Amino acid sequence: MFYREAGQFKTSYKADQALMPILQDRVGLLVILAIAFVVIPVFANDFFLTSIMIPFLVFSLAAIGLNVLTGFCGQLSLGTGAFMGVGAYAAYKLTTIFPDANVIVMVLLSGVFSAAIGAIFGLPSLRIKGLYLAVTTLAAQFFLEWCFIRIGWLYNYNASGAIEIPHREAFGLVVSGAEATPIVRYFIVLCITAGIAFLMANVLRGRIGRSWMMIRDMDIAAELMGIRPLQTKLLAFAVSSYICGVAGAMMVFFWLNAAEPSSYSIALSFQILFMVILGGLGSLGGAFMGAAFIWILPVFLKFIPGTIGIDVAAETVEHVTFMIVGALIIFFLIVEPHGFARLWQIAKQKLRVWPFPY
Amino acid sequence: MNAFATEMSAEPASVAEAVPREELLRVDNVSLSFGGVKAITDISFDILKGEIRAIIGPNGAGKTSMLNVINGFYHPQQGTITWQGKERRKMKPYEAASQGIARTFQNVALFKGMTTLDNIMSGRSLKMHRNFFWQLIWRGPAEREEIEHRKKVEEIIDFLEIQAIRKTPVGRLPYGLQKRVELGRALAMEPDLLLLDEPMAGMNLEEKEDMSRFIIDVNQEFGTTIALIEHDMGVVMDLSDRVVVLDYGKKIADGPPEDVQANQNVIDAYLGVSH
Amino acid sequence: MVGSASASSHGNDTFPKILSHNAKVFGSRTAFREKDFGIWQSWTWSEVCEEIRAFSIGLKSLGLGAGDKVAIVGANRPRLYWAMIAAQALGAVPVPVYSDSVAEEMAYVLGHAEVKFAVVEDQEQVDKLLSMSDEVPSLTNIIYDEVRGLRDYDHTHLHGYETVQEKGRQLQANDGALAGQWAEGFFGGKGSDIAVMLYTSGTTGRPKGVMLSFDNLAVSARNANVFDHLDESEEVLAYLPMAWIGDHVFSLAQAFTAGYCVNCPEGMDTIDVDRREIAPTYFFAPPRVFENMLTQIMVRMEDAGKTKRAMFDFFMNVARKVGEKILNGEEVAFGDRVLYRLGEFLVYGPLKNRMGLTRMKVGYTAGEAIGPEIFRFYRALGLNLKQLYGQTEASVYITLQPDGEIFGDTVGKPAPDVELKIADSGEVMYRSPGVFVGYFKNDEATESTKTSDGWVHTGDAGIIAENGHLKIIDRAKDVGKLNDGSLFAPKYIENKLKFFPNIKEAVAFGHERDMVAVFLNIDLTAVGSWAERNNVNYASYQELAAHPDVYSMVESHVDQVNRDLSSEPMMAGAQIKRFLILHKELDADDGELTRTQKVRRSFIADRYAPLIEALYDGSTSKHVRTEVTFEDGRKGAIEATVEIRNMETHDVGKGIQEAAE
Amino acid sequence: MLYDIFIDPFVQMYDMPDFFLQVLWEGFVAGILYALIALGFVLIFKASGVFNFAQGIMVVFAGLTLVGLNENGVPAYLALALTIGAMGILAYGVERVVMRPLVNQPDIILLMATIGLTYFLIGFGEFVFGGEPKQMITEELGLPTGSTAIEFGDRGLVILQHIDIAAAVIAVLMVAALGIFFNKTRIGRALRAVADDHQAALSVGISLNQIWAIVWFAAGLVALATGIMWGARSDVSFALEIVAFKALPVLILGGFTSIPGAIVGGLIIGFGEKIGELYWGGLVGGGIESWLAYIIALIFLLFRPQGLFGERIIERV
């Protein structure tokens, strides 16, 4: 209905291959960006930024990372939490070693470490597929978690065993540590997430993205067409882990301020995996939708009893939230196993052919 | 007297007989077994440049195994394979691809999550080289490369007459069209040798005729050497220059279609005479 | 001559001259687009000029000269349009030919026109031409656009389009003065020179070659441009046969004179998508196309959910009520205006978008009468669809509906510079600057069509209504009388029948007989969809056509037509007494329709003589056997027992009363 | 360093055989419990190809239900019976709500659904019975609680908890019962038929839906037994969930469809983990129990991707 495509024609491959060939999509994206960069900063309060927007963006980025690996390259991973942890600890160590360096650069750099470790744990993927591969990533999850606990050097031998983010300034603003304002944090997280999402959109539409999807859809055919399986999968592991690492570092630097090993436990891995599955495997937009659902729904549920005037123990709310999330996951899997991205696609298709049914 | 009646002939001049053809691939005494089960026993044959070579035989004769050996997916326990004059070492399938061997599969092996266009673009993977960082930036070299190859792919789409399904996800296409897309994907590799595993399986008569035409066109327009497995004897006899017949993993005949058709071993094999 | 200022030619009286003018004035504007290799390949006017020059010089080097005929065979492609101008620049005359006509027909046309060169689309056409080399002895060179499959052919007299162009470019490079000489060559040309020869397929007899001069085409085109305010910003879709005058004028003459952009679709199976992508601003289609689009809309809406369908029906009613009034600029209540706006957002806009008509400024339909319901449907959506009446011999335009004066049953007022009169016989006659020069090698026919003082017989019977609009009743020679003396206008009856979506074709008989009886063809799409919804199983057209429920449905349509006829005093005597549904679809391959899908009445009468006999001998069914040609060219026969039904007739005027009750 | 790794542990084993035996026993008991969880996985995987992530949580849920009912005044044996009933309802519910609508979906979707089920069961269990750890009602159920010390003369002694012995016995009985069920009963044979070939099973008139409900119920019973045993050794709490992940490496070793494989794999992991932790763990600061099992499985996978009892996979094109 909103899609009026008549008269939109392409006279070059450049235009035909654009990320969003349809005018209305481009307009839609601009509106979303305008909301993210202008409307929210102007109108949102600190609570909204800190409790909803920042974690939402961090998780979206992590979901993009996992989506690269699982959604686009078809390699199931249960170790996302640990890879995020590697980023967090690496960024923490980097800021300790280079106290004067720009903390944003350090956060971006930390992903390199998780990329390297991700690639190492990706090595078995050459021989191991599917659920079996999930076990190797579980090995990564538990091994790395153990490292975060046992290797004191990683957390500067703090008595608490946790990492605490130091006060750092950049561009004349406090960007990390307890004094950093939510709005500054928000902008940093927004820019990094949007930037990486854009770069990934580029990679995914080109040769490399295609080679990942070839491996995902039919690995034998891909190999017979000249795709080197090991390199391709390792690159996917590395890129995915880089993104997750950056997300993990942002999580502690711009959101939590402090993190324990348990922050990066298997529960986080599952949470991200849910976001990816519910959002839609193989869709960048889906990563955002999945993150919004999994993160914002519980926050929302927490406030329902209060707003309708029922006094319920916080614990109970948490339990009920678990139940509801679990049930909704099953519900959405039944309704649309391909996630919100597919639902959106279907809706978009309906809008494009409106008023016809097909 | 009009100019065309005498001087123009619609039939292409046949040059095949005049020039002796170069050998593209030779298989010598190849044997392959899986855990004691012999799939291929001591088979030798050759494929000449520019010809259409058919490999036929009853079910379980080892035809697909033979293709798998040729493109490096299986490694024979015995025998040698000579590719473009050089004896080939044990190699990975992707190396075979980079040496110019492309193939299609018995059960369509398209990338189901992608469109027709992307599937054929995937055939260009080996010829695209822009690294990860160019891909990140996209503008500039990566985009130029993509466009350059898109042009090539559009030519293939035009050639195979699949313009109308360019942006359709392949999973939604009918079987016959999927086969055509798969052929397009193999063509995008610009192979020296094109292996077709039952290109017409499961097609109706009209689709078979289309596919036959495309195979001949590929052979004539691009000069691609083709080795194909096919069950439909009529098709094989029409298309191929020479035919190898396998039965129970052994070669039982080799030669031009008409000779093979007359061969008693072949007739027995197809009628199921016991050994 | 009463041409308005902007319609004057400033000396640009031939298309090659107009081309070089456009290259100067509109140099960087897009002149042609073609969807090829997945995108719209575009050429500006200056690029087109260069392309044409190169090709033209190449043609010259191959021996093409003034007066030679060049056949153009193929689907709408920029290169084929350019080839026409390239030939004209050398003084040669292009002869576009229907590319899907059977070899025999094509051979006759090419032989009759004595073509020397042929520019064709692809291997299929090359093969076709090679196969008829004996019938066309004059043909010396064939130039093809698509190289595929032709590599191994003997190229002594066969050339690729690009090779010829390359040759032309080579020659220009070698001789700097050549381009200038080439231009001088056609600057000597006159407007009265023959521009093109178009063969009319004609309902009877051999095709005739209509010779049109540059003046005919250019003046008519300029007049039409002024009439509908068309300028260089228009976009048109070139998808109708190039051999047809409509396409020639819309996609070439008007495009060149106005300087607008012509878009060639990728292929016939992508036409809907291509139309949507381009969204033409000036659109022409025969009624059949509009009918098909409407049928598709209705069929697809049948599958929509309940609420959506209710919404669609509601807003379509709003549109029918006020849409046309708003389009005509009449007074409409505020509430209706708001509803219409809402409908525009929810229904009309999306519909126009799906059809690719969002940007359409003016649309025309002609060739046959369009169903008033269909016509009103498009107008109600806010599309400025109009009717025109024209002929090859008139360079299309005879009458046009001016904006705001749209009546469903008339075809408009005389086009600019056209004089119109009705002969004593009732035949419509006209005189205009677009009147053709003559039929090629057929003076006899020229004389019988065109009077010495320039009036042309249209062959159609019509009347000029009080408001000055022309109303066409039928072919002049087809209008006949029943034995009781009542007027029998078969086309008029047939059109009324065909306005029902379920009826695809109708053939009425009655001249010099006791009563009117008709053959019908059902529309397989519409009736098939109905059958699906009502769980009626059928395996073939034949089976569906013979289904009793289908018969009853069609019977109700026929009855409605009888009611309509009874309300018109002149036509009331010619109500349908008996009808049958044919067991096969009328098909051009069997010679039952012309290539432009018009019924060939006399041929059908011969072919189905036993059925006609049965219609008039009172029997209720008849067994027949019919030879048919299948798509792949094989011949076969189908047999069937066809049911015949009797109809009640209505008294004059009574129909209205009943309908009103 | 090399000495610490390659020689010292073995010297210790020799020097203190009682400790070594004690470690072996601990490993054996842990292995039995791993094997029991894995058994639940295998049952469901064999019949439906679903990798049931919720098996771990079903163990906790079963234990919680049992204890929770008892806490609310239901006598122990009645609580046991009611818990069995609850597992039946759960099995039926899962079959109706999860399995049936998701039939024919890709593996990963079914896996996700079982993770969703996990969340639901965690939330539901905590909602009903509260989140605090609970004591297993070992005595009330008539299970032994004491311990026996076996002496080796002057070379020390090994202490065996009676509940551990009971666990081993119950595990053996359960495997035996399952063996009989699969081989001797009509439904059991039907289950095997389903595992081999869904189409064939359908053609002999077995309803897939019934079968799924039955295997989920069987897996629920196994989970209940596991829950009782495990709960008797430590507390009943959701911390058990993490331990349940151990079933994965066990399955990798034993193969996803083999009951004997689950037992053998469970024991290997149990032994390996305890020995590794107590003799080598100290070298890197301890706690390697948390990941050793996965690393063992990973290394194993690289050499034998099909598991101990699986068949070699030949890839076909």
Image: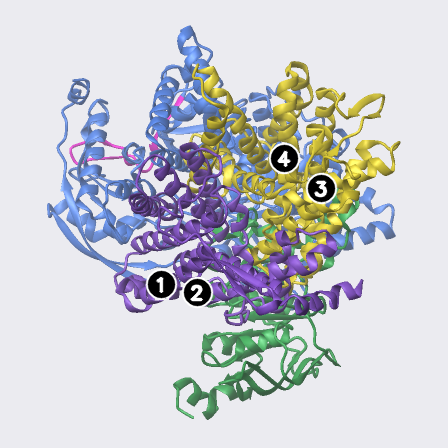
Q: Callout 2: helix, strand or loop? A: helix
Type of residue at label 4?
A: Phe
Q: CA distance from mark 1 to mark 2?
A: 9 Å
The residue that appears at 64% across and 49% down in the rendered structure is A141
Disc 1 crowd rating (10 Å Cα; few below 14, some 14-19, many 20+) is some
- State the residue position of label 3: A245
Residue B9 can be seen in this image: no
Type of residue at label 2?
A: Ile
Q: CA distance from mark 4 to mark 3?
A: 11 Å
Of labels 1 and 4, the one closer to you: 1
- State the residue position of label 1: D178
Check if residue C485 falls in the magenta segment.
yes
The hue used for chain D is purple
Q: Residue C517 location in percent, x, y?
A: 20, 40
Q: Residue B189 location in percent, x, y?
A: 67, 62
Disc 1 and disc 2 in contact, CB within 8 angstroms: yes
